[in-house]
Amino acid sequence: MEAVQRFHYSAPCIDWRNFEGKPRGSLRYSQLGRIKENKRLIAHLKPDKRRDLRQRSVSDKNSSALLETGNILHSPFDEELVLKRKAEEVKPYLNGRSMYLVGMMGSGKTTVGKIMARALGYSFFDCDTLIEEAMNGTSVTEIFEHFGESVFREKETEALKKLSLMYHQVVVSTGGGAVIRPINWKYMHKGISIWLDVPLEALAQRIAAVGTNSRPLLHDDQSGGDPYTVALNRLSTIWEARGEAYTNASARVSLENITSKIGYRNVSDLTPAEIAIEAFEQVQCFLKEEDCMA
Ligand SMILES: Nc1ncnc2c1ncn2[C@@H]1O[C@H](COP(=O)(O)OP(=O)(O)OP(=O)(O)O)[C@@H](O)[C@H]1O
Ligand SMILES: O=C(O)C1=C[C@@H](O)[C@@H](O)[C@H](O)C1
């Protein structure tokens, strides 16, 4: 319990809807002192060393000693507890409403969405998978190739409509482009939409690592650059066209902001569970605002 309290941080509620271009971390931190202290303590550690410490803290019976050296040196076990507790805090105020995760390709909607669903005791759906099932197992890439993007977008809207009308208490990982059609927002606003805002460079790194086979909009056989550069160029073009559409979401989870808040150096140091915890915090902020406006 104590470990939970040490790790606990409160999310600053920000009015990010005054969005101009790509948001960058510029929050007012209520716990700046603690963050600075954390930074000072771990600044000299490389990410793998920090992970090392986290791992050690799980196996070490006296793990509190490690935890006391800074709030960030928590173990996955602590993360689970915080996650569970956050989910329990939020759940009564959701009134069964579903959550829709939006964000660019590779932003972690599926990874984080599954964690959130498990913590809430909700079911999880991946919109791309539902479309593939509705097309008798035809993959997203094949749908794009054989039928074109417009058919895929129609199917995407049908899937979101069905999800929003037929299901409650679900977490949905939407396709990266679900935000571009206003009609889709009509369905997603029946629940709470959460934007996973990840810097393009981090997305390009993840995508370069796994390849673009299942992401037809990122295919680029012409440019011939290395996978990271190709992915970054394609993502930048897509971002230009739809970045602003993500701001329709009820809540924004900025990986850059969490990174500064916890005191990490890179967004790639964040675990999916840490991101899920922040998502619950931002949902709480949204619910409070909603309550004030009612
Ligand atoms: N916090 C994280 N740190 C490092 N890698 C991550 C993180 N979250 C997700 N990933 C990795 O990034 C890749 C994309 O993640 P995921 O499939 O969850 O994203 P997505 O938003 O659902 O993608 P898409 O919309 O393209 O289907 C996966 O290989 C996943 O393991
Ligand atoms: O960003 C996009 O437009 C897409 C993202 C994927 O999840 C798939 O929905 C499809 O590849 C299109």
Image (tube, rainbow, N blue to C red):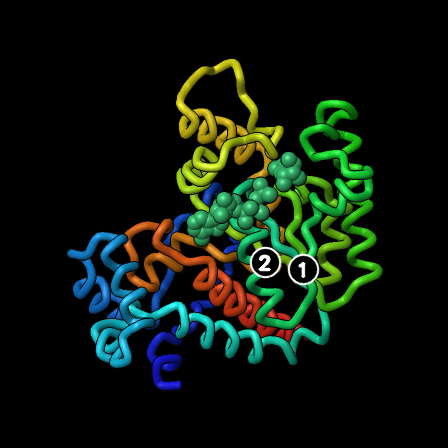
The quadrant of the rendering that contains the N terminus is bottom left
Depth order, front residue of 252/205: 205
The quadrant of the rendering that contains the C terminus is bottom right
Q: How far apart are marks 1 and 2 (CA)?
A: 7 Å
Label annotation for residue 124: 1
Estimate the x, y position of residue 155 in percent, counting from the top left.
80, 40
Residue sitting at x 39%, y 80%: 4
Residue sitting at x 41%, y 19%: 225
Estimate the x, y position of residue 138 in percent, counting from the top left.
76, 34
Mark 1 element type? strand
- Packing grade of label 1 (10 A; few <14, some 14-19, many >=20) is many
Q: Can residue 107 be seen in this view?
A: no
Estimate the x, y position of residue 175 in percent, counting from the top left.
65, 43
Q: What residue type is labelled 1?
A: Phe
**Residues at badges 1 and 2 in contact (C-beta under 8 Å)?**
yes
**Horizontal relation, residue 191 to residue 54: left or right:** right
Residue sitting at x 58%, y 74%: 288
**Horizontal relation, residue 84 to residue 123: left or right:** left
Q: Does the residue labelled 2 lie within 8 Å of ligand 1?
A: yes
Estimate the x, y position of residue 256 in percent, counting from the top left.
39, 52
Indicate whether 149 appears above or below 255: above
Q: In which quarter of the image is residue 169?
A: bottom right
| Residue annotated with mark 2 | 113
